[in-house]
Image: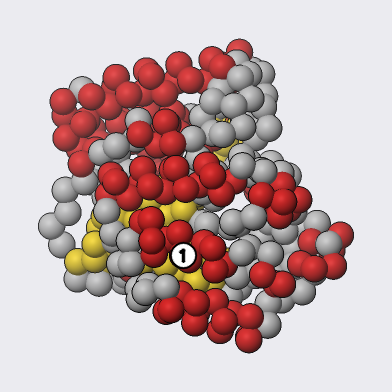
Amino acid sequence: MNVSPSYIKLHNSGELTKRIEKLYKILESCQLCPRKCKVNRLNGELGFCRSGKDLIISSFYQHFGEEKELVGQYGSGAVFLTNCNLGCAYCQNYEVSHLGEGEKSSKEDLVRQMIHLKTLGCHNINFVTPTHFIPQIVEAVDLAAKEGLDLPLVFNCGGYENAEVIKMLEGIFDIYMPDIKYADAVNAKKYSNAEDYFQRLKESVKEMHRQVGDLEIKDGIAVKGLLIRHLVLPNDIAGSKKILEFIAKEISKDSYVNIMDQYRPCYKAVNFAEINRYPLAEEFNKVIEIARESGLHRGF
Ligand code: SF4
């Protein structure tokens, strides 16, 4: 496969170094995500995501559980970042995202991990929950490019992004993979403590799509584009119809949308009767039907 990710060009021209400086500057009064905590993370102050200056990584491995277009034959090179800028009550990964499981890591550690994943044959480097560590990740990518990293980079996020920051990532990430969790502000507040979730999500997903377009697949492997995930929640807490119509009307009918049925009650879901169960098959099938009716046709 002949892949030439655009961050290589930015690395060679020195543009990545300039972006890293600008991204680190944001940490002085952090507005990396829509929470805009305005804490000085470079001085050790912590905001909602409880993350300071140092990277915290929980694990990295050849991941065979992602979409088949990311996994291919040799797996997706997943790097799981610790902590999160969302506060989902039902988080399926809460030990890492909310309880802080992971180790402080240097940029050199992350470079070694990426190069190791490349050596194993992974088809991409897949940063899971990267939002609150964007400057540190981009800095490590710049160093890794020098060491020969040339795999597509995946920005695998919860969708609660600051579109102005996403603009600064143009040409760095090849594949954006946002979850679209809610259309409804009351539910976004109740279950993820992010009332403005859908508004911020719409702005940032439009920007992601402007940069990379619809998902491009070569020889069965995703090389560039937008890959959207949507987790079906019980009792239509997500507001799936509104989400799918947004994708079809305001992004593209050719969007790749992985509609997922694997919700299970985790973490604090027990405190909310309406999400304290698995989604029913009929609820999931209804969402698939809505997607088809909206004109979407890829990824589900
Ligand atoms: S990245 Fe963290 S500290 Fe920065 S604005 Fe978001 S939640 Fe707050």
- Near-viewer residue (281 or 147): 281
Q: Residue at 15% x, 62% y: name it.
A: 1
Measured along the vertical axis of the image, is residue 182 above or below residue 161? below
Q: How many marks?
A: 1
Q: Residue at 77% x, 74% y: name it.
A: 277
Q: Position of residue 95 (x, y in %)?
A: 70, 51
User: Circle 1 sits on which residue?
Assistant: 245
Instruction: Please say whether residue 221 is visible from this viewpoint.
Output: yes
Indicate yes or no: mark 1 CB to ligand 1 under 8 Å.
Answer: no
Mark 1: few/some/many CA within 10 Å (<14, 14-19, 20+):
some
- Near-viewer residue (51 or 297): 297
Is residue 190 rendered to the left or right of residue 176?
right
Q: Where is residue 69 in the image (x, y as percent from the top left)?
A: 33, 68
Amino acid tagged 1: Glu
Q: Where is residue 162 in the image (x, y as percent from the top left)?
A: 49, 35
Query: Hey, which quadrant is residue 124 in on the image?
Result: bottom left
The quadrant the C terminus occupies is bottom left
Instruction: Please say whether residue 108 is visible from this viewpoint.
Output: no
Q: Where is residue 158 in the image (x, y as percent from the top left)?
A: 54, 50
- Near-viewer residue (19 or 293): 293
Query: Hey, which quadrant is residue 248 in on the image?
Result: bottom left
Q: Residue at 54% x, 15% y: name it.
A: 28
Residue extending furthest toward the left: 2
Q: Residue at 38% x, 56% y: name it.
A: 250
Kind of element beneath mark 1: helix
